[in-house]
Amino acid sequence: MEKRIYYHDTDAGGVVYYGNYLKYLEEARTELLEQIGMSVQQLHKSGFLYAVRQCSITYKSPARYGDTIICDARLVEVKAAQLIFEQNIYIKGSQRLLVVAQVALVSLTADFKATAIPEDIKIKLNHLKTKLRKPALGKPALVRHSL
C-alpha cells in the first residue's frame, strides 16, 4: 500500500505520530485480504470478526510531511483461530526502513468469543500465504494500492 504523508499525520516534532503507523498497518492488511476477495464487511455479515490480539512493532526511522511510504503485509501463518502477519513500512524508492511489525489477529464470533477460522476462509488464506514470498525492500508482496 502506498500512502503520502500529510500534515495531519505528523506530530509537533514534524514526524509521523507513532500511533498512525498502526493505522497504516491495518490498511495494508485490509487491502491484502481484499485482493483474495475477503472484505471486512463480508466477514462481519457471515458472523465473524478479526481483531488484533498482539502487535509487536519496532520504530526504526521517522517519516515526515511530504514523504511517500510503502506499507507491506505478508501473511506468514494461519493457526486454528489466529492469523500472523509480518509487515514493513519504508520510504518509497529508498532502502530506508521505518517500521517492522508482527501482528496477530484472532478470529471472533459476533459476540466477541474466540472461534476457529472457518475452513473455507482457511483455504483462501493458505492460498494467499503460498502465493506470497518475503518481498524485497521496495517491492510489495502483491499489487500496491494508492490511497
Image (cartoon, rainbow, N blue to C red):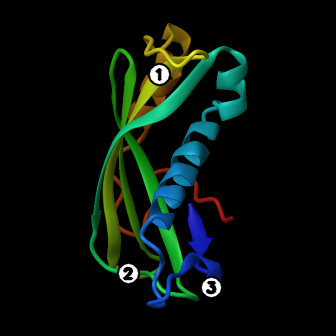
Name which residue type carries label 2: Pro
Query: What label sits on residue 7 in the rendered view?
Result: 3
What is the spatial separation of the Cα atoms under label 3 and label 1, in whole angstroms?
A: 35 Å
Secondary structure beneath label 3: helix
Badge 3 or badge 1: first in the primary sequence = 3
The part of the image, by quadrant, that contains residue 145 is: bottom right
- State which quarter of the image contains the C terminus: bottom right
Q: Is residue 135 above or below residue 113?
A: below
Secondary structure beneath label 2: loop
Mark 1 burial class by Cα count in 10 Å: few <14, some 14-19, many 20+: many
Query: What label sits on residue 132 in the rendered view?
Result: none
Q: Where is residue 33 in the image (x, y as percent from the top left)?
A: 57, 37
Q: Where is residue 56 in the image (x, y as percent from the top left)?
A: 28, 50
What is the spatial separation of the Cα atoms under label 2 and label 1, in whole angstroms?
A: 32 Å
Badge 2 or badge 3: first in the primary sequence = 3
Q: Mark 1 points at which residue?
A: 107
Q: In this view, does 133 lie above or below 80?
A: below
- State which quarter of the image contains the N terminus: bottom right
- Position of 60 with respect to 73 (left or right) is left
Q: Where is residue 29 in the image (x, y as percent from the top left)?
A: 51, 46
Q: Residue at x 63, y 79 (%)?
A: 8
